[in-house]
Amino acid sequence: MILDRENYDLWLDPGTQNVAAISELLKPFDARLMRCYPVSSRVNHVANDDEECSRPVEIAEPQNRLFV
């Protein structure tokens, strides 16, 4: 689930009874607003649950492409 920041409170409010408002949030996030980048292998260990896991890292050696 990817939400716009202005919808955090609505989504997390346990008292929300407005099903239509919540249902409106269940739509695909605009892919043009997403970005991707390599992250540390720290994400592969469940004990690592901090912001360091989502920091971009430099790749020392480019990987070979799986598909051309």
Image: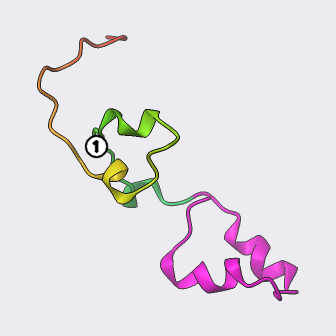
Q: Is residue 56 above or below residue 19?
A: above
Q: Is residue 66 above or below residue 36?
A: above
> Where does the image place residue 18, in percent across and percent down from the top left?
85, 86
The magenta span reads: 1-28
Among the 4 quarters of the image, the one containing residue 51: bottom left
Q: Give the camera-side residue of 17 and 42.
A: 42
Residue beneath the point at 79% across and 83% down: 14
Q: Which residue is mark 1?
A: 37
In the image, residue 32 lies in the stretch drawn in magenta: no
> Where does the image place residue 37, in percent across and percent down from the top left?
28, 43
Q: Residues within 10 Å of mark 1 (few under 14, many from 20)?
A: few
Residue beneath the point at 45% across and 53% down: 31
Direction from residue 36 to residue 61 in the image, left or right: left
> Where does the image place residue 10, in percent across and percent down from the top left?
68, 84
In the image, residue 21 lies in the stretch drawn in magenta: yes
Direction from residue 22 to residue 56 in the image, left or right: left
For the view shown, which residue lies furthest in the left direction?
A: 60
Q: Give the camera-side residue of 53 and 33.
A: 53
What coloring was used for the rendering?
rainbow
> Where does the image place residue 68, in percent across and percent down from the top left?
31, 11
Direction from residue 40 to residue 60 in the image, left or right: left
Secondary structure of the residue carrying numbered label 1: loop
Q: Is residue 9 above or below residue 23?
A: below
